Image (tube, rainbow, N blue to C red):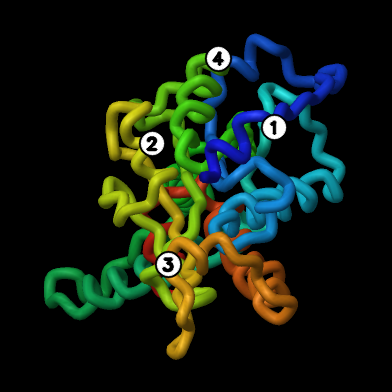
Amino acid sequence: LEYNILKAHLLTASLPTPPSNTMSSATKKHLPHVVLFGIGNVLPALSQTRHNVGAILVQQYLTELDSRGLERKQTGKNAWMYSGVRCNEALVDDFRQRTVQRIKRKHLAQQAAQQSLPEFQGTATEQLSNEQLEALVQEKLLQFCPQPEVNLHLMLPSTAMNLSGNALRSYCDLQHISYKSKRDRILIVYDDLDLPFQSCKMKFKSGDAGHNGIKDVERKLGTNKFYRLKVGIQREGGTLQSGRDYVMSKFNRQEMGVIEGTVYQQIRDICFEGFPHLDVSDVMTKMNSL
């Protein structure tokens, strides 16, 4: 039914002039690519349904990035790229400060332990130089933020839900994004009827759980080895609608307020800001501990 409705719906968009940027195009090409794809249905009448929660959240992030003054260019139907996006400086500064303190505490503990040994009693302890400290900090920073600068792609629905794989595969091929490499990263954001409302789970290489959009992505990419962020839309007790009718129904005002408020803020701060740059296992741990 969704496909028949959408079959005659043509989405046209004029491509804007690519923005100027001080970074050379050659440099941009060699940056890792990161795709945040909020899957759903392209038809405007279905845009605010529970089935489109992934698209709602990615759209909200797109709007926020624009408000920060970041320049983007349209790189596909309902797809945009922000070139040379750097890791959030506040995240890096906070990690640096905490790392410096941890290293200093560890060094002092090692000194105290050493001085407790008879053979070292009365000897001068080796001090940690600024150069040694900075080298240790840089090593930890590289582990924390292995991709400090990326080309960030945001994708919204351009097809029916059950053709999401077509859109993603075509876009990756066009932009030379390797969806089977560890360098380029893809995160699919979508609804999960089995998760409680407003809860989220981030996974890698999990099953499709009957979700037609994810089924098509796995089929068209030829792999299930990609990251996915599941957003809970579980029905409350007493709801008589079928699962299909429920996911195709719209959020009420209160529910939408929660999705665009608390849920979005948590996903933005941990996942959307962290996933492109940081160690993904750390991002998943934080996301799944909410």
**Residue at 42% across / 67% down in the picture?**
243
State which quadrant residue 91 falls in: bottom right
Residue at the spot of label 2: 216
* Amino acid type assigned to the residue bearing label 3 in the image: Gly
Q: What element carries label 4?
A: helix
**Sequence-first disc among 4 and 2:** 4
In this rendered view, identify the residue nearer to me: 22 or 208: 208
CB-based contact (under 8 Å), mark 4 and mark 1: no
Tag 2: amino acid: Asp
Residue indicated by mark 3: 243
Per the model, the C-alpha gap separating discs 4 and 1 is 23 Å
Taking 249 as reference, is 261 left or right?
A: right
Marks 1 and 2, the one that precedes in the sequence: 1
Alpha carbon of mark 4 to alpha carbon of mark 2: how far? 19 Å
Dot in front, 4 or 1: 1
Which residue is the site of mark 1?
A: 9
Residue closest to the far left: 118
Q: Is residue 140 visible?
A: no
Location of mark 4 (residue): 174
Compute the Cα span from label 1 to label 3: 25 Å
> Which of the two labelled residues, at mark 1 and mark 3, occupies the earlier sequence position?
1
Q: Nearer the viewer, mark 4 or mark 3?
A: 3
